[in-house]
Amino acid sequence: MKLPMRPDGIATRIVAAALVVVAVVLIVLAFGVMQVGAQSFADLMAAAGQSAEHVGEMFTKSVAGVFVVAAVVATIAALIVGSILARRIARPIERLADAAQRTAEGDLRATAPVEGPAEVRALANAFNVMVDRLAEQDAVRREFVVNASHELRTPLTNLQGYLEALRDGVLPPDPATFDSLREEVDRLTRLASSLDALAGADDERPMPEDLDLGALVRSSLELATPSFARRSIAIESAVASGIVVHARSDELAQVVSNLLQNAIRYTPSGGTARVTVGRDDGDAMVRVSNTGGDIPPEDLPRVWERFFRVERSRDRASGGAGIGLAIVKRLIEQAGGRVGATSEAGVTTFWFSLPV
């Protein structure tokens, strides 16, 4: 489909610029030919014995006539070449603008054709990459809404069931019932705290302090041991003493807890989890490993992304909202450390390091 040349468009301006250049050239040539050339022609013809009237007639019929024809041909050529060049440049830009407009209206499948000059092709490529990123983020957002809804619905449904049972007298108001209610409330509180941490809420954050990393990991492991036992998961540990790091205790405890919960969630019944604390190249290193299915190599770098879950082995039935590892990465990097993961031969390991 041919795009019309708009009066204020780039194609019209390119053609106009070409015509201006031709006009300037013609003016210069006209001055040279009609003034300087005419005088030289008259002098030569006068030396040959021709009259001034005859000389003027000869000049008009020969040189001036040819100049007029050349000027007309040059103008037409400038129009044709300028139009072709202008359309070649304007067409991909207008298509890119059309794709941008459709993207602004919510069509995240609108891509721009990669055509035209090198600069325009580079612009179209950058635009298409941007649209792909927007589509990925939109998919992540939709997945998060589904996951968050699921994570919220489960404890809310349980709370509703307990409260209705208490109201109807089906359950007695004893400590065990209230412990179950508190468990569901704590679950909701942890989800809200995780979202706050992921959003980077800095309200009332304590100052970093020197911490015994081994003691903190052992304390977190003791709290998680009953959960491992309920799922028949054997837990092994090798925690070195005397490793001191400078970090916020609550945030570091949350990091360790998230990694342990991740191991509990994805280790099959009868499997094994292992926690180690030591030194590596002068830094403090914590590793949490678990047996189970491998994470595909192409998905391994993305496990730290917000709301990303490996769908083939970590579906909604076994997984959370997909924010635990993202929180680990955020908190550890804020503390000046690094995170990483490996998965092979049926063993998946998540690790983080902190300067000592």
Image: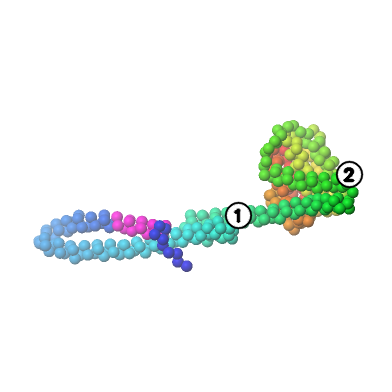
C-alpha separation, residue under disc 1 versus residue under disc 2: 50 Å
Residue 301 seen in this snapshot: no
At mark 1, the secondary structure is: helix
> Picture coordinates of residue 343 (x, y %)?
75, 51
Picture layout, residue 220 above or below residue 82: above
Q: Residue at left 76%, top 47%?
A: 188
Q: Residue at left 10%, top 62%?
A: 51
> Picture coordinates of residue 226 (x, y %)?
86, 45
Q: Residue 265 has which mark?
A: none
- Residues under numbered marks 1 and 2 in contact, where contact means CB atoms less than 8 Å apart: no
- Mark 1 closeness class: few <14, some 14–19, many ≥20 residues within 10 Å: some
Q: Circle 1 sits on which residue? A: 134
Which amino acid type is marked by label 2? Pro
At mark 2, the secondary structure is: helix
Judging depth in this view, the residue of 277 and 312 nearest the camera is: 312
Judging depth in this view, the residue of 288 and 279 nearest the camera is: 288
Which amino acid type is marked by label 1? Leu
Instruction: State the extent of the magenta-drawn residues as a range.
Output: 10-24
Task: Please state which of the two labelled residues, at mark 1 or mark 2, is closer to the viewer.
Answer: 2
- Quarter of the image for residue 106 reads bottom right
| Quarter of the rendering occupied by the C terminus | top right
Judging depth in this view, the residue of 210 and 44 nearest the camera is: 210
Q: Circle 2 sits on which residue? A: 175
